[in-house]
Image: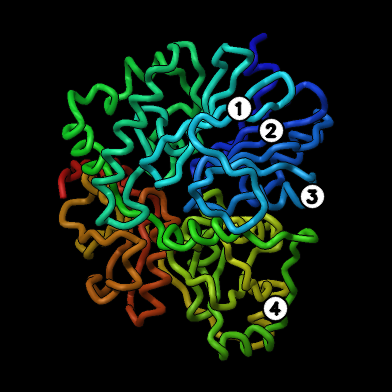
Amino acid sequence: MGFVDDHLISLVDKGLGNSAYLVDLGDGRALAVDASRDLRALRAAADRRGLTVAYAADTHLHADFLSGAVQLAADDGATVLASAAGDRAFPHTPLADGDETDLGGLTLRALATPGHTDEHLSFLLLDGTRELGVFTGGSLIVGSAARTDLLGADRAEELARAQYHSLRRLAELPDTTEVWPTHGAGSFCSAPPGAERTTTIGDQRRANPLLAAPNEDAFVAQLLGSLGSYPAYFDRLGEANRRGPAVLTAAPALAALSPAQVRSLLGEGAHLVDVRSVVDFAQGHIPGAISIPLRDQFATWLGWLLPDDTPIVFVAAPDQDLSELTWQALKIGYERLAGHLDGGMDTWTADGGRQQSIELLPADRIAERPVLDVRQRAEHIDGHIPGAVHIELGDLNMRSGDAPEGAVVACGHGERAMTAASLLQRAGHQDLAVLDGGPADWAKATGRALEEGA
């Protein structure tokens, strides 16, 4: 058994496309790297091994989740390790390039690898002089490198050039060095879909197309050309992580609300989010509700579509896990969770509450109706229903007027399409329907080819 099998635990957040890491230091203590504020999986892994987190290292000021380092410091007395250049406003050990931390038998060396952010560090884990692996955060990732436009489009090229040099610095490590990135498949920080979560320096030297770029200009063009949109909340969390998230003193709970309380909150400007399935929402929902089904990607769409400074009321099905909902919201900084409708839609209708519905259409019944494709640009280009209007879901709040009336809304499976349809219905659109499935189902049902290109 090697070091990874015996000592390294990878904790994957499939919804955000990220990995955190827990390193068993062999003496009852552990190192956590890029832990999220949602520490449930990390706590479970540490408890199974009887570990206390002694060190919490962050590779950069994360934009896609709130760091759990401050919480680990409060709960476990962990020493927070982070870049001195990050100017964090809470107690931590500030590190510069080349600084080393003695973990008690192992050593953690900070490597300045700017690009994804200005203050980005990678952490090289050493056993004596032997390089075991490197936590690369948003620098070198499997098959790519993380995006460089999170500090503004005006700085994207400058940071891409920094990323070029950072990747080449990391590529100088021995081929056998393990690479443990934070961002992976599914991350809007730009990881290629389907990529493995971890790799080695040797594999990346052979297979990463960015490392194969012939020069810096080619690298920059390739990296910047791959960038798509990203969730709106990314623009807020870097600063929130610099200040430090609030410490949670108890497991969060969601208040149970009566229909009268829900109406009162909505009258005061609260948002209403329905987390039930696409089918349940289609059959009947409270007017004005936004459909964001509770699944791995819930946090992404909550943070993309709703502000964080307005109270949110939730509607859930009886069998849904309200703690999962709450943790997904808290890990991206959504604290104003007013509560959930006690008893769900049955309570609402029993109290005389009105409902709306949205038709779910199978692929063979959309006929000649206009189609609105709300997937990401790259997905649309890969293949869409011919003639479909394309507006990304993340842009729909600002572009609802561009959506065709009476549209059938489509995505890959139906969840994003129902979210889009709920936004359009709230904006006053009528006669909406949602494609039950995606473009591939339409092609199979009709025997017609999908259209490629923008």
The residue that disc 2 covers is: 31
Rendered image quadrant of residue 392: bottom left
Q: Is residue 319 visible?
A: no
The numbered dot on residue 164 is: none
Mark 4 → mark 2, Cα distance in angstroms: 47 Å
Residue denoted by label 3: 75
Q: Are marks 2 and 1 in contact (CB under 8 Å)?
A: yes
* Tag nearer the camera, 4 or 2: 2
Separation of residues labelled 2 and 1 (CA atoms): 10 Å
Q: CA distance from mark 1 to mark 4?
A: 55 Å
Secondary structure of the residue carrying numbered label 1: strand
The amino acid type, in three-letter code, at marker 3 is Asp
Query: What residue is at 78 percent from the left and 30 percent from the top?
Result: 29
Looking at the rendered structure, the kind of residue marked 1 is Leu
| Cα gap from disc 1 to disc 3, whole angstroms | 22 Å
Q: Which residue in the protein does label 1 denote?
A: 108
User: In the rendering, at what x and y percent does residue 143 appear?
Assistant: 36, 27
Residue that label 4 marks: 347
Q: Between marks 3 and 4, how big is the CA–CA gap?
A: 39 Å
Residue drawn at (49%, 29%), measured in percent from left and top? 197
Residue type at mark 2: give it: Leu
Q: Nearer the viewer, mark 2 or mark 1?
A: 1
Give the image location of residue 349, x and y in percent. Answer: 64, 81
